[in-house]
Amino acid sequence: DRHLEIKLNASDILNEDMIVYRNAGSDVNGALYDNTALGLDYNKGDDIMSRIGKGVNLSLSATYKI
């Protein structure tokens, strides 16, 4: 009843960066304001605070049962 089991796991295969940004907008008078707390999506003109490249994660494991 012996057998060999091999597993390959992959995550973050698209290798997308994690971006931390601050939303910027303007009110009716044209003054810029910070609406970070509103949780809005990234738009052109927003301030990128940091960009973190996590990379692709791969793991390989082998188990032999006797």
Image (cartoon, grey):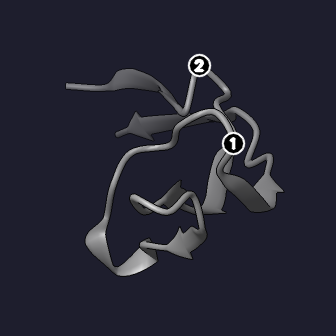
Which quarter of the image is occupied by the N terminus? Answer: top left
Tell me the SS state at disc 2. loop
Residue tagged by mark 1? 45
Q: CA distance from mark 2 to mark 1?
A: 25 Å
The residue under label 2 is which amino acid type?
Leu
**Residue assigned mark 2:** 14
Where is residue 56? Give x, y as percent.
Answer: 70, 32
Q: Position of residue 18 (x, y in %)?
A: 63, 50
Q: Is residue 7 left or right of residue 18?
A: left
- Mark with earlier residue (2, 1): 2
- The C terminus: image quadrant: top left
Quarter of the rendering containing residue 61: top right
Left or right side of 34 for 44: right
Q: Quadrant of residue 57?
A: top right
Residue for point 42% across, 72% down: 35
User: Counting other residues with Cα less than 10 Å from the Cα at mark 1, is it few (<14), some (14-19), or many (20 or more)?
Assistant: few
